[in-house]
C-alpha cells in the first residue's frame, strides 16, 4: 500500500482563495476591511519569520495588517496597555500575540487580556470553554486546519475511531474536542500512554502532536488509516539540517491510507486558518453572514 499524500500547501491555497473572495465581498457590499494585528515581543528569529509570513499573506487576501514589534524588555503593563488599545480599535478584528514571550512576561495573563471575540488564535479561556461545551467560539488555527483536511478527504467523520497523540492546550485538547464535535470516538494519548502503539493501531484517524521527532512509526499505524502529522521538528541528519514530523514518514506512508507530509502538510494550514478566523471575527463583529466552510 502507498498512502495518498494530503497536500496541505494546495489545500491552504484554496482556503486563502475563499478568504480573499469573502474579503472582496465585505468591501464591496458593506464597506468593511478585516484587520489583523500581530504583536511580536523580542527578536526570536523563527518568530520573526512567522510574523513576516503572516503579514504578507494578510495583505495578499486583501485584509489590513497591523504589526507591533516590541523590544524584549517590554514590561507586562506596557504589553497589556497595547492589547487594551487593540481591543478598543474597531479596525482590528483579530489580535495575535506571537508565542513564546520573553520569560518575564505571563503568557496566560496576556492571552486572557485579548477580547475573546478578537482572539483569532482561539487560546483565550472563554474560547476554550465555549469549544469544550460545543458552542460557537474562535477555534485554534492548527486543529481547525486538521479538521478541514480530514473532512475534505474523508467526508463524514461520524463513528470513526480517532486517536490524538498529544495533550497540549494548543493542539491536542482542542483537536480532540473538534473530533468529538464531528461524532468521532476519541482517545487522547501521549508519550506516557501504556502500549501507545497498540492504542494508535485502533485508530481510523491518527493525529500526531506529541512534539517528538519521528516517534510514530509504521508499527503504530492501522492499515488504511488517515494520519495527520502536526509535528515540525528541526533535526540534523548526515550533517544536514532537516525538517521532520512526529511521524516517521517512510514507514507510516507504507501502511496508511492517507498521510500529511512534513513540510507541506499541516503547517501551511495554520496561517490560512488564522486568516479565516480573522474574516469570521470581522463578520461576527459586524453582524454580517460568515463565510461557509471556513469555521466549525
Image: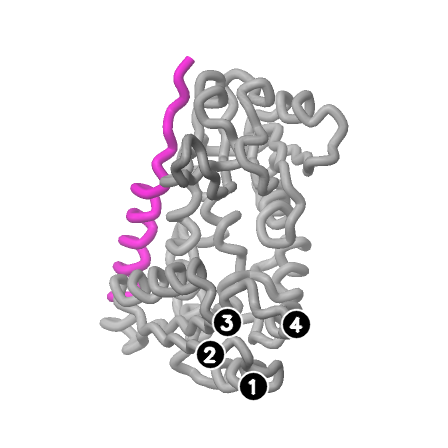
Element under label 1? helix
The N terminus appears in which quarter of the rendering? top left
Mark 4: secondary structure: loop
Q: CB of mark 2 within 8 Å of CB of mark 1?
A: yes
Tell me if 110 is positioned left or right of 290 in this view: right
Tell me which numbered mark, 3 or 1, is placed earlier along the sequence: 1
Which of the two residues, 61 or 230, is positioned nearer the viewer here? 230
Q: Which residue extends farthest front?
A: 239
Residue 78: give x, y in percent of width and height.
56, 86
Q: Mark 3 points at which residue?
A: 118
How far across and down, in percent of the image, does residue 211 sit? Answer: 58, 42
Residue matched to label 2: 70
Residue that label 1 marks: 78
Instruction: Mark 2 or mark 1: name the one nearer the start of the chain.
Output: 2
Which residue is the site of mark 4? 106
Dominant secondary-structure state across the stretch colored magenta: helix
Task: Please say if the residues under marks 2 and 3 sit with CB atoms less than 8 Å apart.
Answer: no
Amino acid at each position: 500500500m502507498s498512502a495518498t499524500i494530503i497536500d496541505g500547501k494546495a489545500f491552504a491555497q484554496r482556503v486563502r482563495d475563499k478568504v480573499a473572495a469573502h474579503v472582496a465581498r465585505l468591501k464591496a457590499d458593506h464597506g468593511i476591511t478585516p484587520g489583523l494585528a500581530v504583536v511580536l515581543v523580542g527578536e526570536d528569529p523563527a518568530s520573526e519569520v512567522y510574523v513576516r509570513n503572516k503579514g504578507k499573506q494578510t495583505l495578499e487576501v486583501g485584509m489590513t495588517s497591523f504589526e507591533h514589534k516590541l523590544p524584549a524588555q517590554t514590561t507586562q503593563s506596557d504589553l497589556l496597555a497595547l492589547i487594551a488599545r487593540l481591543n478598543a480599535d474597531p479596525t482590528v478584528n483579530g489580535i495575535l500575540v506571537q508565542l513564546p514571550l520573553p520569560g518575564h512576561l505571563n503568557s496566560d495573563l496576556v492571552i486572557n487580556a485579548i477580547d475573546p471575540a478578537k482572539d483569532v488564535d482561539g487560546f483565550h479561556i472563554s474560547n476554550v470553554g465555549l469549544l469544550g461545551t460545543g458552542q460557537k467560539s474562535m477555534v485554534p488555527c492548527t486543529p481547525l486546519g486538521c479538521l478541514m483536511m480530514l473532512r475534505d478527504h474523508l467526508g463524514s467523520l461520524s463513528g470513526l475511531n480517532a486517536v490524538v497523540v498529544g495533550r497540549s492546550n494548543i493542539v491536542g485538547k482542542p483537536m480532540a474536542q473538534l473530533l468529538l464535535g464531528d461524532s468521532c470516538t476519541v482517545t487522547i494519548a501521549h508519550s506516557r500512554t501504556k502500549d501507545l502503539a497498540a492504542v494508535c493501531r485502533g485508530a481510523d484517524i491518527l493525529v500526531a502532536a506529541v512534539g517528538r521527532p519521528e516517534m510514530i512509526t509504521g508499527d503504530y499505524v492501522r492499515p488504511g488509516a488517515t494520519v495527520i502529522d502536526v509535528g515540525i521538528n528541526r533535526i540534523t541528519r548526515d550533517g544536514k539540517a532537516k525538517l521532520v514530523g512526529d511521524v516517521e514518514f517512510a514507514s507510516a506512508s507504507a501502511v496508511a491510507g492517507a498521510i500529511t507530509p512534513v513540510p507541506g502538510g499541516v503547517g501551511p494550514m495554520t496561517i490560512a486558518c488564522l486568516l479565516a478566523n480573522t474574516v469570521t471575527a470581522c463578520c461576527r463583529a459586524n453582524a454580517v453572514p460568515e463565510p461557509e466552510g471556513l469555521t466549525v
